[in-house]
Image (tube, rainbow, N blue to C red):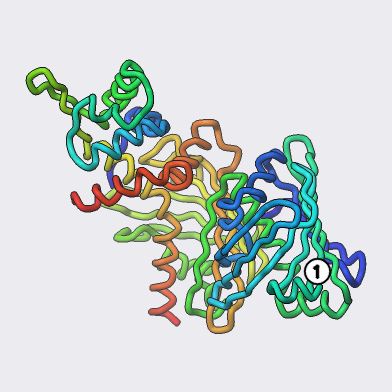
Amino acid sequence: MVKYSQHQLDLAFGALAHPIRRGILARLSTGEASVAELAKPFKVSAPAITKHMKILEEAGLLSRKKLGRVHRCRLEERRMKQAQEWLAEHRKFWNDKLDALERYLKENP
Amino acid sequence: MTAMKKVEAASDLEIVITRLIDAPVARVWRAWTDNAEIVKWWGPHGFADETEKREFKPGGHWRHTMIGPDGTRFPNYATYKEIEENKRIVLVNAGSKEDAEKGVGFRSEITFKAVGNKTEITMRSVFPTAAMREHVVKEFKAIEGGHQTLSRLAARVEGDFVMFRMVGAPRERVWRAWTSEKELGAWMGPKGAETGYAKLDFRVGGSYHYMNKYAGKEMWGLATYEAINKPSELVFVQQFSDKDRGLSVHPLSPTWPKRLRTTVHLQDFGAKTLISLYWKPLAPTEAEAKTFEQAMDGMKGGWGGSFDRLDEFLKGGE
């Protein structure tokens, strides 16, 4: 099991709580993109998109690097995975227990 | 599960089931009227619902099949007669369109009543004959099933975690696995952990105090029994603990709810047993409630859709 920093998780879940930010991450899951490409599907202003990207960056879910004059954005998979693992560990608690109970009953009828 | 519930055998023709639900009327109404929501909780424990079409308006129909935990399919055809927002729903239930057209069926009225910030829900079904009422009570276990349905509804709107599992052992055997010190220790501990200590005092107010050694670390837990109804129901409150039975927090997530009530319901299916499990944070702080909600609900429901692709991607990248 991994020890998660509560602060990091709060940032990550806060960032994930907005549909536009989830849309940005979903797009990045298919590969790197420029800011303009990311903004395209959403009918919001450029400053609004920039604000969403900042929140994703602070949560460590997105990173940017400059290539010439264009910013390329990519998904920070490691942080995304951490958040998902944390959720999954709790959610599968009873699932794992009942798996164990079933195995036990099979071996000890 | 300990919430108020009662059956009135007011007449030979009626079945009346009520429950006080800890959520405002508008939330309960939405669970009942939203097509995507009702199929997630409709039906007794372990049931699934396949809806072909549902038109929630007076004169509209709900054509659906309820699938029991053993796979038995129960076709249903309901016709909505009256709908009063946040107040009541009147409908006629039949097995099929043909039956509905012939007038074979029974009438149900569901009423929603605000009790402070909670909702009292009443399901009243009236049958044309006492024999028909008797039939659905005996054959379809309509009273128990009605309570189970409202209990799933309550769990959904109150934000509890619910899980159903059919296991291949008779109920008495499953009960023993949940209630004997030796057996609990054999399956309850985390995978790869060694049970270092286990003491069961099996009575209401008694407890199961245990310690697991996991990767060289001691993890203590304490479960206190609130209700024991052999062989069908077990209610206990779980908490992280220490060797002196104190209250502790989750070692990996400090805002995990400090106390969780688990209700285990065992239903007899001959050589098999249906386990229904409810998990509810007890008097959670705001942060604890949020943590529980995120963990249980985070990736489904509101977060669905755009995330499926992301999920696949992350799995592929292992």
Residue in the foreground of this view, choosing between B112 and B3: B112
Label 1 lies in what chain? B
According to the picture, the residue beneath numbered tag 1 turns out to be B106
Q: Secondary structure at mark 1?
A: strand
Q: Crowding at label 1, few (<14), some or many (≥20) Cα neighbours within 10 Å?
A: many
Res. B42 visible in picture: yes
Query: What residue is rendered at 29% in x and 47% in y?
Result: A1
- Tell me where residue B104 appears, x and y as whole percent: 79, 75
- Tell me where residue B220 appears, x and y as whole percent: 42, 49
Q: As drawn, is A44 to the left or to the right of B110?
A: left
Residue B259 higher or lower than B48, as above or below? above
Query: What residue is rendered at 57% in x and 71% in y?
Result: B67
Q: As drawn, is B81 to the left or to the right of B250?
A: right
Res. A6 visible in picture: no
Q: As drawn, is B17 to the left or to the right of B176?
A: right
Residue in the foreground of this view, choosing between A17 and A49: A49
